[in-house]
Image (tube, coloured by chain):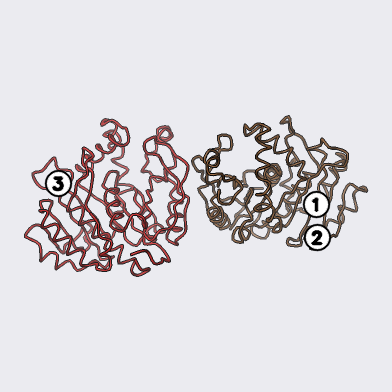
Chain colours: A brown, B red
Amino acid sequence: MPLKRFDRPVILGMVGDSASGKTTLARGVARILGEDRVAAIRTDDYHRYSRAERKENGLSALDPRANYMDIIEQHLELLSQGKPILKPVYDHEKGELAAPEYVAPKPFIIVEGLLGYSSKEMRDCYDVKVYLEPDEDLRIDWKIQRDTVERGYTKDQVLASLDKRRSLSPAHIHPQRAFADIVVQFKRPAGHAEERGAHLDVRHILRPTLPHPNLAPLVDASAKNELSLDLTRDEDGKPVDVLGLSGSLTDERAAALENLLWDLIPEAGHLRANVGEFRNADNESMVSHPLALSQLLIAYHMVKAALGIHVI
Amino acid sequence: MPLKRFDRPVILGMVGDSASGKTTLARGVARILGEDRVAAIRTDDYHRYSRAERKENGLSALDPRANYMDIIEQHLELLSQGKPILKPVYDHEKGELAAPEYVAPKPFIIVEGLLGYSSKEMRDCYDVKVYLEPDEDLRIDWKIQRDTVERGYTKDQVLASLDKRRSLSPAHIHPQRAFADIVVQFKRPAGHAEERGAHLDVRHILRPTLPHPNLAPLVDASAKNELSLDLTRDEDGKPVDVLGLSGSLTDERAAALENLLWDLIPEAGHLRANVGEFRNADNESMVSHPLALSQLLIAYHMVKAALGIHVI
């Protein structure tokens, strides 16, 4: 179904530490929403300094002072008003700033990055705010894999970088967790120390800042231990729901659960597509059911928000 | 006197065809206002395509379709609200787009370029709008000089480019003349076919869209033919004042006239500096009295506008 009209876009935030899975999750959501109707923004493009300059001035790329924070805020505001931006570009491979690129307004915008919830002005621009918080061991594995394969670093360089950032993440990244509507936690199932993809367990901390779907039918329909929904206290003591999904789910059960989740957003049936895809350590395309569930849950909120604004 | 405070900047527009003298005039005004209190924006930086891309798609750099027109408009609006921008950069020497640069708000902003008055939204952002319209022979001389010396073109290439643009300037550049508060016309004095700098005559068409200073004392104090102020009809039939200055003015008389013009803006006495400087064909620094008068007249309006907003 073609886009009818839109007054302003629906904006999804995807914040988390380096290599926490932001791009993989964002891509899956974009595929559900329809890639031609999504503009993807990465706040890494707002780095103020090249890699060489950062080496000289000693600032980490995740230090707000090493980023055009006020321009991120300004561009978020412009996008939320349905206006175009001329977005800067950081070339991760070369470690250099490049010519900017024009980003036209689209019905959906996904903003992923390290510092996307740093100010109230930024946070007010989002319709849905996600924070990614994989187990630290898992994140380190992911970071080594990505930075050595895609960004030309050696493993020792990645480990040194992780070490250097150990105090910066608690100062600048972690505090943003408090502002998310959904916190997504991937972790290895007990006894699977090598697992990094298809069979990870996932927990979703659902804050009451968004009208989450009624998940009871989903949980009732699932086999024991496959899916759980628990009322609990978050680490800050606040009441939350925690939606858990086991990585050991079979393909059949996963398909049945996905059907049920799709049924919760009948308005978006035409958006249905393959979800849950990711690239493994050998850069092969794989499917993860927990990842699919995360993507669907986020897409559900994007579609609901869009229905309040425009016909999708 | 240091800057006290400012709520929004005073914005000067400097529009005209290629090589019409925009940069020289803008630099002089910036020097009067104090270079550290001026942000200079060149709309050439908003070219959408590199030189190689334009060669391929056949679009001239002065075609609006070859420029991020909506982003020029957006950035003008942001600057007029005292907000920073991340300005794109076009490298004239390489003919390529480069990494953008951060432009912080300043008390004065000078925006020069080919297409700065293209939309009402743009025009509404300026406090003072200048249009440069040198005699065409003079402009061609200036363009050949600049493009061969500074931009690495051959004379034949410049002439070919001028030829190609002959239909584009009337379509896109010239119509903007109608929106200027001041039209500045440099021309060779009769019988000086080679003159291109210090001894040019200049005419200022003063539209009643700005409260021009009382120039009568200046004209009365001048010798015959040095300075003139005439009520006349512009080429569109509308009433205007035309302030003319002869290039044959002596240094002593010029100094006296400059003193008189400075006396009209006593609030800005502390801004006084050497004005009228330009670079000749041998790239030597020279002084032109007609140029100095143009710069002072424009600076007068900038200072007056600033006094309505902030203490300078």
Mark number, residue A263: 1
Question: What's the chain of the residue with tag 1?
Answer: A
Write the residue at 87% across / 49% down. A227
Same chain for the residues at labels 1 and 2, yes or no? Answer: yes
Q: Secondary structure at mark 1?
A: helix
Q: Residues within 10 Å of mark 1 (few under 14, many from 20)?
A: few
Question: Residue flagged by tag 1: what amino acid is it?
Answer: Asp
Q: Would you place residue B128 above or below residue A57 in this image?
A: below
Q: Residues within 10 Å of mark 2 (few under 14, many from 20)?
A: some
Q: Would you place residue A285 above or below residue A202 in this image?
A: above
Q: Residues within 10 Å of mark 3 (few under 14, many from 20)?
A: many
Image-quadrant location for residue B197:
top left
Across and down, in percent, residue B125 comes to: 39, 60
Same chain for the residues at labels 3 and 1, yes or no? Answer: no
Q: Nearer the viewer, mark 1 or mark 2?
A: 2
What residue sits right under mark 2 in the picture? A240
Give the alpha-carbon distance from disc 1 to disc 2, as whole Å: 24 Å
Count of marks, rendered view: 3
Across and down, in percent, residue A91 comes to: 56, 38
- A234 vs B268, left or right, is right
What residue sits right under mark 3 in the picture? B188
- In the rendered image, which quarter contains the C terminus of chain B? bottom left
Across and down, in percent, residue A200 comes to: 82, 41
Along the line of sight, the residue nearer the viewer: B263 or A302: B263
Mark number, residue A78: none
Q: Would you place residue A155 above or below residue B268 in this image?
A: above
- B164 vs A156, left or right, is left
Residue furthest to the right in view is: A224
- A231 vs A84, left or right, is right
Image-quadrant location for residue B232:
bottom left
